[in-house]
Image: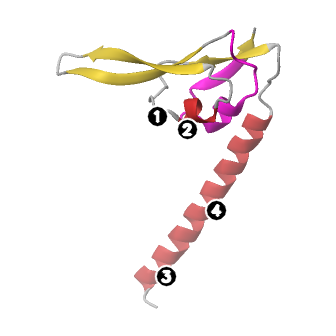
Amino acid sequence: MTGADELRKRREQEAVRIRTALNRQRGEQRANTKGGEGTVAFVEERKCIGCDQCTIVCDDDAIELYFVDVKSPLMTVESNRKAKIIRDACTGCRLCVLACPTDAITMIDR
């Protein structure tokens, strides 16, 4: 094994170790997220990427996607989707919080 191969292998092992530690920490933070009947999900629009993961896991049909026009000096994007919580339907189960890849969804007091 050459020095470059050994270095590449060590970097890959270190990357796995770091990824595992970050995932463990993220899981602990999410496990401490409050939930239940007294809470409701809240979407921070600027973090939402419209990936649809929250709507897939929501058994209560409490999340819908809507379209937002994004205008900038360079271009207009007409298919930018964002998630919206239907507060009356939300049971506070936290599944959407766990599914969100960008941490755009949090639980707040009802």
Residue 53 placement, left or right of 57: left
Where does the image place residue 45, in percent across and percent down from the top left?
49, 18
Q: Label 3: state its secondary structure.
A: helix
> What's the amino acid at mark 2?
Pro
Marks 3 and 2, the one that precedes in the sequence: 3
Q: CA distance from mark 2 to mark 1?
A: 9 Å
Q: Few, some or many C-alpha atoms within 10 Å of disc 1 (few <14, some 14-19, many ≥20)?
A: some
Where does the C terminus fall, quadrant-wise? top right
Marks 2 and 1, the one that precedes in the sequence: 1
> What's the amino acid at mark 3?
Glu
Residue carrying label 4: 17
Marks 3 and 1, the one that precedes in the sequence: 3
Residue carrying label 1: 51
- Which mark is on residue 6? 3
Magenta span contains residue 68: no
Residue carrying label 2: 101
